[in-house]
């Protein structure tokens, strides 16, 4: 093979491979960094849920103390709330078991607030009114944090499952994140007639 043809082949090879190299490498970097950002956004959103749940957990002892004096026969509900709150302190924050326990606690607190309606003196107490408002605000913050977390999870999971980022996700072992789901009791339709029979 003569030198001009060899140089021509080399130039053609360089002209063909360099654009591929300069397009592929930045694309891979962009895909990888996008997955990392989405994973970090999920962690950040989860910490928002965690902070809101912790704030609610700190409010619960005050709520239980205020209600205890009035509600002797609701002792088991108060005990369940306190016991569940204490168990939550020991559970791994990232576990799906915790999601279920948090949903259970939300249900118990809602039942407690409905029960408070049966005690006019307690209901009229300034401290109780303040605690109810605080609890309602906390529940709204928790719900907003859960929505933000689920949106971040959806973005990450979509990136993990769609092409071309799914290739990078499988190479670098990115895992799908679980959604924060409502438990079955939260999906049940409430029976209102029981509240009107009092």
Image (tube, rainbow, N blue to C red):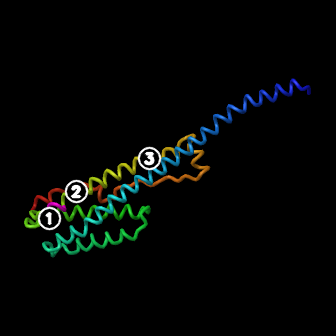
Say which element carries label 2. helix
Of labels 3 and 1, the one closer to you: 1
Q: Quadrant of the N terminus?
A: top right
Of labels 2 and 1, the one closer to you: 1
> Horizontally, is 178 left or right of 189 in the view?
right
Magenta-colored segment: predominant secondary structure: helix
Image coords of residue 88 (percent x, y) = 36, 68
Answer whether residue 179 is magenta in the image. no
Residue at horizontal 78 percent and vertical 27 percent from the top: 11
Which residue carries the number 3 mark? 154
Q: Residue furthest right?
A: 1
Circle 3 packing at 10 Å, graded few (<14), some (14-19), many (20+), is some
Which residue carries the number 1 mark? 127
Query: Relative to 169, does residue 91 appear above or below in the rendering?
Result: below
Which residue carries the number 2 mark? 136
Residues shaded magenta: 127-131
Along the polypeptide, which appears first: circle 3 or circle 1? 1
Along the polypeptide, which appears first: circle 2 or circle 1? 1
> Horizontally, is 9 left or right of 36 in the view?
right
* Front in this rendered view, residue 182 or 83: 83
Q: Which label is found at residue 170?
A: none
């Amino acid at each position: 093979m003569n030198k001009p043809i060899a140089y021509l082949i080399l130039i053609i090879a360089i002209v063909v491979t360099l654009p591929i190299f300069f397009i592929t490498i930045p694309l891979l970097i962009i895909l990888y960094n996008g997955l990392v950002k989405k994973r970090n956004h999920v962690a950040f959103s989860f910490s928002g849920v965690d902070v809101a749940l912790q704030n609610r957990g700190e409010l619960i002892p005050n709520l239980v103390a205020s209600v205890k004096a009035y509600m002797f026969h609701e002792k088991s509900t108060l005990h369940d709330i306190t016991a569940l709150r204490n168990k939550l302190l020991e559970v791994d924050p990232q576990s799906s078991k915790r999601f279920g326990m948090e949903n259970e606690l939300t249900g118990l607190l809602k039942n407690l607030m409905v029960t408070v309606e049966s005690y006019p003196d307690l209901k009229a107490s300034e401290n109780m009114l303040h605690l109810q408002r605080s609890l309602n605000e906390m529940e709204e913050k928790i719900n907003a944090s859960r929505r933000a977390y689920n949106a971040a999870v959806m973005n990450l999971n979509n990136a993990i499952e769609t092409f071309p980022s799914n290739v990078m996700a499988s190479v670098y072992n990115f895992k799908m994140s679980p959604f924060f789901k409502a438990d079955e009791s939260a999906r049940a339709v409430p029976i209102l007639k029981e509240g009107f029979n009092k």
